[in-house]
Image (cartoon, rainbow, N blue to C red):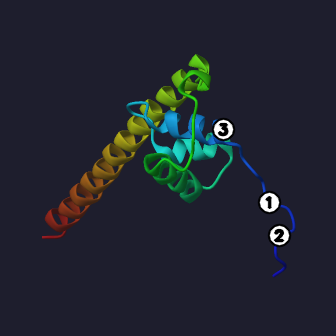
Amino acid sequence: MARRKHYNRYDDDFKATAVSLTDIPGVLAKHVAEALDIHEVMLYRWCMEMRRGQIMAKKKNIHIDPEVKSELKRLRKLEREHSLLQEEYALLKKAIQFSLRQKGKSSSS
């Protein structure tokens, strides 16, 4: 497999904005990474570098678009609802299978 010849370089403002997006309650770093089209591990590394002070951010320059913020919150809410529906579906499926087995046992005797 050939190695990449071009790597993306991100400035400190971009990194600081990405890290600040992860600080929004209810927003996962995984979703921020997907939205910014970066690897999740890279985002975690930037968070660590920010804590250590290696990324120098000008707090006044960090601006989070309210639309992006609301979209990330909406995505998180939809994912929670989806996982709940998946669990309910699995439980109903098991209940139906169990009742069919019980019917089969009682009708054969």
Amino acid type, callout 3: Phe
Circle 1/circle 2 CB separation < 8 Å: yes
Dot 3 corresponds to which residue? 14
- Along the line of sight, the residue nearer the viewer: 40 or 58: 58
Percent across and percent down for residue 47 are 48, 48
Percent across and percent down for residue 6 are 85, 62
Dot 1 corresponds to which residue? 7
- In the rendered image, which quarter contains the N terminus? bottom right
Task: Report the Cα–Cα distance between label 3 and label 2.
Answer: 22 Å
What crowding class fits label 3: few (fewer than 14 Cα within 10 Å), some (14-19), or many (20 or more)? some
Circle 3/circle 2 CB separation < 8 Å: no
Percent across and percent down for residue 92 are 30, 47
Q: How many marks?
A: 3
What crowding class fits label 1: few (fewer than 14 Cα within 10 Å), some (14-19), or many (20 or more)? few
Label ID, residue 58: none
Dot 2 corresponds to which residue? 4
Circle 1/circle 3 CB separation < 8 Å: no
Amino acid type, callout 1: Tyr
Dot 2 falls on a residue whose secondary structure is loop
